[in-house]
Image (spheres, rainbow, N blue to C red):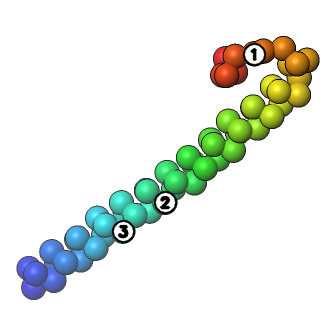
Amino acid sequence: MGALLLVLLLALILGGVGFAVHILWWIAIIVLVVWALGFVFRGAGSGGGRGRWYRW
């Protein structure tokens, strides 16, 4: 009985970690896309001048 509870608890913990890591990957992809779009729009709006590599 104790071993079964231990296995179920381990599965619950690993499932939660997997879900959190999955969500963090999606957040990282969204941030990367927004960052890349910042390069595109900054390059189009800079008028050919040499700008900073970051937006803030």
* Label 3 residue SS: helix
* CA separation in Å, label 1 and label 3: 45 Å
* CA separation in Å, label 3 and label 2: 10 Å
Binning the other alpha carbons within 10 Å of mark 1 as few (below 14), some (14 to 19) or many (20 upward) gives few
Q: Nearer the viewer, mark 3 or mark 2?
A: 2
CB of mark 1 within 8 Å of CB of mark 2?
Answer: no
| Badge 1 or badge 3: first in the primary sequence | 3
* Label 2 residue SS: helix
Q: Is residue 29 left or right of residue 44?
A: left
Q: Position of residue 53 (x, y in %)?
A: 67, 22
Nearer the observer, 42 or 21: 42
- Amino acid type shown at disc 3: Gly
Residue at the image position 28 percent from the left and 73 percent from the top: 11
Q: Is residue 29 left or right of residue 45?
A: left
- Amino acid type shown at disc 2: His
Residue at the image position 62 percent from the left and 41 percent from the top: 31
